[in-house]
Image: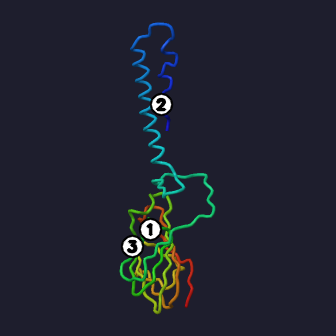
Amino acid sequence: MASSIVPGNIDGAYPVAGQDNSSQGFRDNFTAIRNNFTDAKTEIEDLQNNRATTNANTSFNDYTVSRATFKDTAQTVYPHGTTSGTITLNHENGHYQTITTNGNISLTFSNSNFPASGTLGRIILDVTYQNTAHNIVVSGATIVAGNVTGFTSGTNTIAVSDTGRYLYEFLTTDGGTVVLMHQLGAVYV
């Protein structure tokens, strides 16, 4: 952003010492100074409101951060808790989400919260089947990879026969219109 402050609008040689100076010159200088202060105030407030900070959350509003190196970072874990029924996976809740089932679940996606088409949206879902296995029904817009244990394409159902933890990854590059699903692994207990 280019600055609107124009120091050249102020006549630094005015008033001229030892001569009668026009009052219009004073008015012009004061007007230029006032306008520059007004512009400076606006620009400073913009910097304060739109800066990245180390002592508060920062939103980049989907702008690109490029050529960055990240070290010692973390990702949010979003716990859906122990539940059954319809579960909506919302990308804005975080990339790693957990569910412990106490009945069958049906997965849907909050498509309005996936990144825009042409960028990658990714959710890892950590499902714990506690004491007994339950079924997962995935939405019809989900393309399920062949490595998903117990998946039946005709019903879009994952029928798990063992209790344990299963990791699934969901990927989309078109804002959630089509979601690709595959299984990252399973630990049987």
Question: Which is closer to the viewer, label 1 or label 3?
Answer: 1
- Labelled disc at residue 93: 1
Of residues 85 and 19, the one nearer the viewer is: 19
Q: Pick whichever of labels 1 and 2 is earlier in the sequence.
A: 2
- Mark 1: which secondary structure? helix
**Residue that numbered label 2 is attached to:** 5
- Mark 2: which secondary structure? loop
Q: Residue at x 41, y 33 (%)?
A: 38
- Mark 3: which secondary structure? strand
Q: Position of residue 125 (x, y in %)?
A: 49, 75
- Determine whether label 1 and label 2 are within 8 Å by CB: no
Q: Residue at x 48, y 27 (%)?
A: 6
State whether residue 5 is above or below residue 101.
above
State whether residue 18 is above or below residue 93.
above
Question: Which is closer to the viewer, label 1 or label 2?
Answer: 2
**Residue that numbered label 3 is attached to:** 88
